[in-house]
Amino acid sequence: MFTYTNSFMKKLVMVLSVFLYAVIPLSAQDEYSSSLTGGNFDPGDLLVEVTGTPFQGSSLMDFGSLRLRYGVTQTLVPRLGISMDLNNTQTTPDVVTNLSKFELRPGLEYHLGINDAFRSYAFVDVILGSRSASRESTTGSSVDGSTQVPTSANYNFSSAYRGYFRYGAALGFGADYHFSSRFYIGAEIGFQLYQDKMSEISVDKEKFQDSVTSSYGNMSTQNSIRIGFKLF
């Protein structure tokens, strides 16, 4: 766990700045304009896709994110990713746990190359998310901010079972292959930097532990495989 400082924001700004300086000059390439005629993805098109991560979770392909993409121009494509996991479970007759999360990823793609049905692009996303966690019991302790019941005064709550508010950014590269005017598949890989402000913990409505903050930076494989369709 890390105490919140301005260093996280400085790192985030630095990462975004490097991305923008690397991508924006590409728009000045004159020879690129002659190839903006293919790819089956034209300005005004709206695409919807589901994203998945192979070999993670309980199945071969873990699908959990929905994304919308809109073609403003041949090279600029705003997008919005939405993912959620609603998990409200009655673990025993007297205990109900809630561990539900929601995440938004608004972003922008800059398409670097279009060659008939194949397209490659760079992207940057803003990460905004939250997770709610609680344990309600009619016979034992009820907890807000986590699904775990503390057993000591300095109990170490696991971040996997604790609520949070998340913000950060992701950037990387991706590619699409359009089989027809309506269907395509793609892949992405990148880097993400984000911070989780963990929820304050209360037990039986009394404050037990203050909020803490954690920072993370890692390779992003959350949406590495994508299957999409053109709506119109």
Image: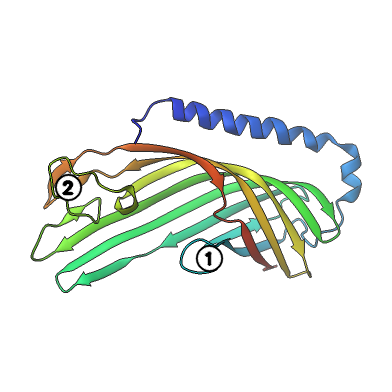
Look at the image and tell me in which quarter the N terminus lies: top left
Q: Which mark is residue 63?
A: 1
Q: Is residue 18 left or right of residue 175?
A: left
Please, what is the three-letter code of the amino acid marked with disc 2?
Answer: Ser
Q: Is residue 2 above or below residue 56?
A: above
Q: Which residue is identified by label 2?
A: 202
Please, what is the three-letter code of the amino acid marked with disc 1?
Answer: Phe
Q: Quadrant of residue 148?
A: bottom left
* Nearest the eye: 148 or 28: 148
Q: Position of residue 20 (x, y in %)?
A: 67, 33
* Nearest the eye: 79 or 212: 212
**Mark 2 packing: few (<14 Cα in 10 Å), some, or many (20+)?**
some
Q: Secondary structure at mark 2?
A: strand
Look at the image and tell me in which quarter the C terminus lies: bottom right
**Mark 1 packing: few (<14 Cα in 10 Å), some, or many (20+)?**
some
Residue in the image at 31% along x and 43% along y: 198
Q: Secondary structure at mark 1?
A: strand
Q: Is residue 128 above or below residue 115?
A: above
Q: Position of residue 107 (x, y in %)?
A: 59, 47
Q: How many marks?
A: 2
Q: Position of residue 94 (x, y in %)?
A: 14, 70
